[in-house]
């Protein structure tokens, strides 16, 4: 219970490939009855992969936006029993073709708490080991890997080149972590 609220029920409306949409009911502090659409998500991970002074990003098509986005290698927690760090390493290999034996947790955040329970953890990887990329979706088959000088990322965020939330959060957390 948070601030006098409590969930009283939940009905699944749709189970999809990535998310589950539910109608959840709640009781307010004075007995008010409310209903909200809630998106259930398994959670996600993202990796800021640094190779010297360059960050490894991927440019991939995002159907919901019908455009390509420049992003950190990332993905959802969709392997039963897999830890968040192991999922981050898996995603880094799949999308960028690198592995990282050591990861440092940079940030944990709720992507859009107004309607979704997705929790994302962002890691920093600095000791990259080449690996064979393994695309597991059509979008990943066509993504491109791009190297961006770390000193350029603030400007790319400011000018709207990078708008993906996990990427903005991860890059800014990296700059803070490195004292830049």
Image (cartoon, rainbow, N blue to C red):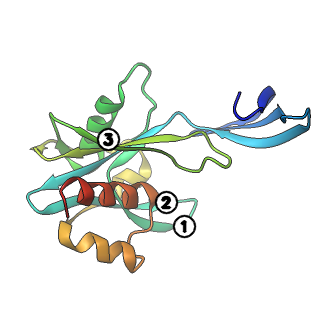
Rendering coords of residue 163 (x, y %) = 44, 68
Seen in the image, is 155 located left or right of residue 101?
right
Please rate how many residues cluster around mark 2, counting C-alpha atoms within 10 Å: few if below 14, some from 14 to 19, many from 20: few
Q: Nearer the viewer, residue 132 or 35?
A: 35
Q: Is residue 43 visible?
A: yes
On residue 89, the disc is: none
* Quadrant location, the C terminus: bottom left
- Discs 2, 1 touching: Cβ within 8 Å: yes
> Which residue in the protein does label 2 denote?
62
Against 120, residue 167 (above or below) is below
Marker count (numbered): 3
> Which residue in the protein does label 1 denote?
66
Secondary structure beneath label 3: helix
Rendering coords of residue 13 (x, y %) = 78, 36
> Which residue in the protein does label 3 denote?
91
Q: Label 2 vs label 1: CA separation?
A: 6 Å
Please rate how many residues cluster around mark 3, counting C-alpha atoms within 10 Å: few if below 14, some from 14 to 19, many from 20: many
- Residue under the point 54% across and 59% down: 63
Rendering coords of residue 56 (x, y %) = 22, 58
Secondary structure beneath label 2: strand
- Residue under the point 33% across and 75% down: 156
In the image, farthest residue toward the top: 81
Q: Label 3 vs label 2: CA separation?
A: 16 Å
Q: Nearer the viewer, residue 32 or 81?
A: 32
Rendering coords of residue 118 (x, y %) = 55, 41
Q: Label 1 vs label 3: CA separation?
A: 22 Å
Against 88, residue 161 (above or below) is below
Q: Is residue 149 visible?
A: no
């Amino acid at each position: 219970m948070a601030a006098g609220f409590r969930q009283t029920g939940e009905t699944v409306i749709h189970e999809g490939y990535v998310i589950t949409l539910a109608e959840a009911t709640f009781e307010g502090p004075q007995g008010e009855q409310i209903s909200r659409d809630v998106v259930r998500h398994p959670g996600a991970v993202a990796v800021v992969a640094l190779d010297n002074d360059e960050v490894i990003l991927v440019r991939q098509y995002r159907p919901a936006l019908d455009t390509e986005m420049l992003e950190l290698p990332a993905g959802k927690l969709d392997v039963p029993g897999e830890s968040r760090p192991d999922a981050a390493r898996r995603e880094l290999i799949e999308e960028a073709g690198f592995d990282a034996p050591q990861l440092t947790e940079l940030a944990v955040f709720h992507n859009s708490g107004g309607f979704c329970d997705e929790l994302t953890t962002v890691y920093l990887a600095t000791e990259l080991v080449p690996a064979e990329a393994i695309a597991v979706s059509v979008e990943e088959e066509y993504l491109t890997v791009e190297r961006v000088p770390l000193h350029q990322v603030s400007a790319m965020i400011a000018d709207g080149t990078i708008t993906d939330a996990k990427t903005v959060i991860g890059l800014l957390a990296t700059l803070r972590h490195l004292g830049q």
